[in-house]
Structure formats: C-alpha cells, structure tokens
Amino acid sequence: MRALKWIAGILGVVVLAAALVFFGNFFSKNSSNVATKSSTTKSANSSSKKGIQVTGKTDDSSYKTVIKDGKYLTSKARGITAGQESNNFNMVSFESGLLDFSKEHFNTSKYVFQEGQYLSATTATDWLDRKSASNPDGLNPEDNGKTDDSRAPFYLQTLEEQDFMTQDGNDLKLAGIVIGMAMNTQDVYQKEQWGANFTQDISKADRISHGKEMAAEVVKRYRAMSGVGNDVPIYVAMYAQAPEDSLSGGNFYSWSVANSGDTLGNWTDLDRQTVVLPMQDGTTSEKSVGSALNTSFKNFTDKLQGFFPNLSSITGQASYDGSNLKGLNVTVSTQFYSATEIESFANYIAETAPSYLPNGVPVQIRMEASTGMQAYIIKGANDSKYTVTILGSY
C-alpha cells in the first residue's frame, strides 16, 4: 500500500506541490486592476552561467533561493513528502508550516534558502520504512506480525529537510538545517495484500515519545553526514498528521534544536492548529479561533456562488499560532471548461478576495476542476492585491 502511495504521489501530487510554490513557470494572465507580479524573481546572475547563483526576492517575507547552472536546485529527496501523503491537506500544511517555522529561526533578510541537499531519496525511503534485517536503518519499528491494535504501527510518515545558507560574495556556507518530521495519529494498514484497509489509532503519548526517540536518531545521522559541521544548528520540528479522510491538515506540535554535537536540547511545545472553513454549524460557539474569519469566508463564498453558479464547493484551511492567523489556503472547485470562463472567474476572485479575505497574511487560492488545476490566485503577507496565474492547458 505504501508503495502505491509512492507511485501515486510521484505521478500527481508532487506536481501540485511544486506548482503551489513555483507557479511562475506557467503563463500568467492578469486583469487590469490585479497586481502583476511573477512568483519567480530575477537571478542575481545570468541563468546561462555555470555554478551556484542566488535569486533575488519579491519582498522581505521571502527567501533568496539557490540556483545551480541556471536551474533551481531541487531537493535530493524530492517527491518523498508527496509520495508518502494520501491526504493533500496534510502535504500542504506540512510543507507550508515547516517554512513558516523556519522563518522564525532563520531571518529571511540574512539567510538564503536551499532545498535539502544532504538526505537523498534512497536514504529517506530507507529511514521511513520499518527496521528489519534487510533495512537496519528503518526508523519505524519492526513488524511484530500482529494484525490488530497490538501491531507495531508506522509512527513516522514522512520527513523533509530545509537548508539555510549565509552568503559571502559568490560563496554559500551552510548555517543551519531544519528537519520536519510528520508523525501519524492513525496508521492505515492491510491484513493481507490488496485487502481492505484498517485503521489503527496512535495515542498522543506514543506519538510524542516515539517521535522524540526518532528525532534524536535523525540528528545523530545528520551530524555524521559529510558537509554537516559539528556546530551547524539542526532544528527538528514535529508534526501531527491529520487522518486520511480529514478535510484539514495536521499541525506542528513541538520542536527542539541541537546547536552543536548530536544531542537535542529541551523540547518546546507549539500551539498550532488548523481550522477548516466554512465551519460546521455549532463550531463557532465552541471555538473562538476562526469565528470572525468564518463569517467573512461565508460572505466570500456567497459572493462567488452568486456570480458564478457552476461551483461544486469552496473550502478553506486557516492556520493559527495560538489565536494569531498565520495563513489561509482556499480551494475553489469548479465545472468550467472554456478558457474564457476560467480566466474571467479567476480574475473575479482576485478582485473580490481583498474585500473578504484577511490582510497581513499569505493567502493562496487554488481553482481546480476534475481535469486538474486551472488557476492560482495568491498574495503575500505584505501585498494588497492578488496575482493570477492561469495554467497553460485546460
């Protein structure tokens, strides 16, 4: 089953993840009163040059990034997160939340972001598997042969590495590593190959304790990697996966750092949560977080549905740190087929969103149909207007 998830992720989900972050490679069409700004920025050097260069950036909330030989330097474990995730909400929350965490510890004005270059896809796959005679590097426990709730579950679902560099002229130096570890709250398994799926709940205490043990081992392994110095800070951020059928992603719940050596310091709890919009009836009276946003989101939904009735659904994921909103991801499912309908509606969303959706935080709106993604409408935390990107095929 996990092999099938890997194949499905590689074929589809990783494309979505890459598009969400680097959509500037697609052809953009903007209405006259919508901000025109590509998500890709001009390189500090010509793309035809060989070697390592650093991009510019659009605003103070984003990092400069690394390009090599004129191309974006991708992660050596590229596709691992997507391949291990059957819930797209988990993938988006995990990747975006990890970058938000990194920004709290590595200032965007001082550090350059580099996709993980130390953990390879092969090594990551071994680490995420069970420990066995043929795979002594597996971080998940050995199979005890049980097929009920006494079985040894997969605790660790996926992990991701982010590298942060300092620049001195044309030279980049590793200044820190952030590792995100996504822990299961439920493990989905089969009692026999191609059989029915069963769900095993994992208690909070087990998730936390096994996560700490695995994090300590991961740091030791990273510290032994070539190029990772003894004094390079290694941060580990722990993420609790939402169940596969959840309409929202999970949350980061704690972090620790090994400033030097291979021993993590004390763990710090995080008060992160994800609110699904629109909230179900009765939810707002039980949880104050998200209530005000829920009202404006419903008004936004009504406005769009009133203008374009051929909408299947509009849902949102709001990320909070305590009571502070950190970001909003919106998915608009449509039944549009013509290029003119798609372009008109995307621009209408961009014109309408500022009146209803929050300012001061990043907002991503995905417009999709059964045939795939049709458009992205986004703004940064410091932007007042939205940028529209229409995909080149319909």
Image (cartoon, rainbow, N blue to C red):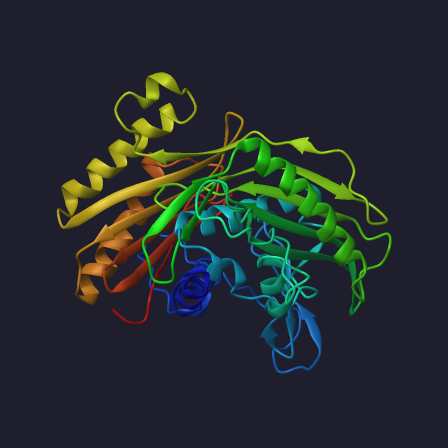
Image location of residue 237, percent across then percent down? 64, 43
> Up-down: is 290 above or below 87?
above
Is residue 141 shown left or right of residue 213?
left
120 lies above or below 349: below
The answer to whether any part of residue 162 appears in the image is: yes
User: x, y percentage for residue 31?
Assistant: 30, 57
Residue at horizontal 29 percent and vertical 54 percent from the top: 367
Q: What number of labels is visible?
A: 0
The quarter of the picture where the C terminus appears is bottom left
| Figure check: 151 above or below 143 | above
> Which residue appears farthest toward the front when viewing the image?
145
Q: At x 52% / y 43%, what residue is drawn?
A: 382
Q: Which residue is at the far left?
A: 309
Image quarter where the N terminus lies is bottom left
Q: 33 or 360: which is nearer to us?
A: 360
Q: Position of residue 58 (x, y in %)?
A: 56, 55
The front one of 181 and 167 is 181
Q: Position of residue 309 (x, y in %)?
A: 13, 46
* 156 to the left or right of 225: left
Judging depth in this view, the residue of 55 and 264 nearest the camera is 264
Residue 243 seen in the current view:
no
On the picture, is 334 further left or further right than 217? Answer: left
